[in-house]
Image: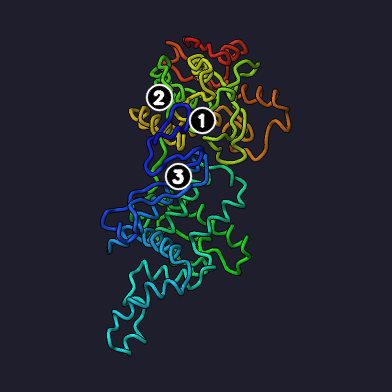
Amino acid sequence: MIVKLGYALSIKTKYLQKRGNVFQFAMRIPTELVPHYGKQHIRKSLKTSDEIDALRKAERLARTYKAEFAALSQNKNLTPSETIEAASRMAERYQTLDSFVEAVAEPKRQAYAGQCWETYEHAPVEEFLTPVEQEALKRLQNPQELRLSGVFTYYEQHHTKGNDPQFIERCRRYWSQFVGVTGDIPFADLKRSHVRSYIDHRLADGMATGTVRRELNQLRAIAQTCITETEANRSNPFRSVSIQNEGKDAKDKKVPSDMELREIIAKFLDDPSPTALIILMQLETGTRVGEISGLKLADVVLDHETPHIDLKDNEWRTLKNDSSERSVPLVGVALHAARQAVASHRGKHEWLFPNYAKPRGNDSASAAVNKRLRPWGLTSHCFRHAMTDRLKNADVTQDVRDEIKGHGSGKMDAYYGKGRALRKKQENMLRVAIPLGPESEKKAPPTELTEDGAEGMARGGAPGLRPG
């Protein structure tokens, strides 16, 4: 069926049907396994009318049943995560230890031992049960034991962003990735050696040490929440874990020169595409790509003495931290691009760039922008580094720099009021805004502007700049 995820995005899904207003999960059973199940299809009510929730539940069920199908087909190459999924389903199906022993363990034990009483008495379960059956047996022997698969629930329930589906889905992906490597072992059995194995696994996959460190930081937070909430008397195995040669594989981040910034402006100034407008808005605001691509139309405030954008969390994009919630003045080409985006928008959608109002839309925007910046060997994030250097070179104080870029620990509004804070940020951003025109190609942009020049830059009318 077709599921609509937003104004500009619909996807065709498998395994989903709708009965009335409630979504149903439906999957065809492989022909060779029909005798085992006694039916041709698996059907379950997902007990929700919400598309996103239904997709998430259907994905989880599909992954579980596919793992079970693979296990029943005697697939010897199941991954740890597939073994976990299949064992979970098997334990759920038999429900009690007695029923599992009677239907599975005991017949296999007798068949393995034959007439040998010694073998029957002393053979370990590894000799006659498959890995999936062994894991199911462990679960049924101690059904209340907290396993890694249940740890994330505590994080989702108690984190301040627990109601943010994108944040939770990203964190869940990290944790599921870890469980897929270690197996769904009891949380009490989680040791430093498991964390080390995970690090080795990720590095072997070609991940940079910086990426692995970010993952470990998130995993540590998830584990710590569980330790705190369950009042477990144990240390966090993720704490203070070192990564061999950490940082030595990091590549120097290129910072675009003033000449390259002017070339980029000249290239995209007359380009009305969303990626070009995002590039121009980033270039003169120093924002993250997701902060621009995830703007709502209402977040772009042009009818104001200090035109600006209001950056705040929304359903398709969360900000990195509390300090990232801020207002950033629009000057020069950023103001020009914002006006173009609003003018071409004509109020058809609530999103400024509807193509990126979707799950992981930030990632899509980043990929599209980076592709267009490839001729300069740049990424969208380079504009943040460039803005830092430009503001430093203009002797802009760190508190103002932090507030512009969303690094500040406090809010300028608290000291100046929103109007004065915006004007103060605007004044400093105008000092480094890049003027355009024939002469600017021959000399570096000035770090100071006359009052008349500053006013023109704020209106998006720098020398040679065509207003939107």
To which residue does mark 3 refer?
24
- Give me the disc on residue 294: 1
Q: Secondary structure at mark 3?
A: strand
* Viewer-nearest residue: 185 or 12: 12
* Viewer-nearest residue: 143 or 292: 143
Can you give x and y, in whole percent of width and height, for residue 452 in the image?
A: 60, 10
Does 358 sit left or right of 201 as displayed? right
What separation in Å lies between label 3 and label 1 (alpha carbons)? 32 Å
Q: Residues within 10 Å of mark 3 (few under 14, many from 20)?
A: many
- Residue ID at (45%, 63%): 92
Q: Earlier in the sequence, mark 3 or mark 1?
A: 3
Which of the two discs, 3 and 1, sits closer to the camera? 3
Q: Earlier in the sequence, mark 2 or mark 3?
A: 3
Does 421 sit left or right of 343 as displayed? right
Q: Is residue 362 visible?
A: no
Q: Residues within 10 Å of mark 2 (few under 14, many from 20)?
A: few
Q: Amino acid at mark 3?
A: Gln
Q: Amino acid at mark 1?
A: Gly
Can you give x and y, in whole percent of width and height, for residue 304 in the image?
A: 64, 17
Which of the two discs, 2 and 3, sits closer to the camera? 3
- Residue ID at (38%, 18%): 267
To which residue does mark 2 refer?
260
Can you give x and y, in whole percent of width and height, for residue 184 in the image?
A: 44, 63
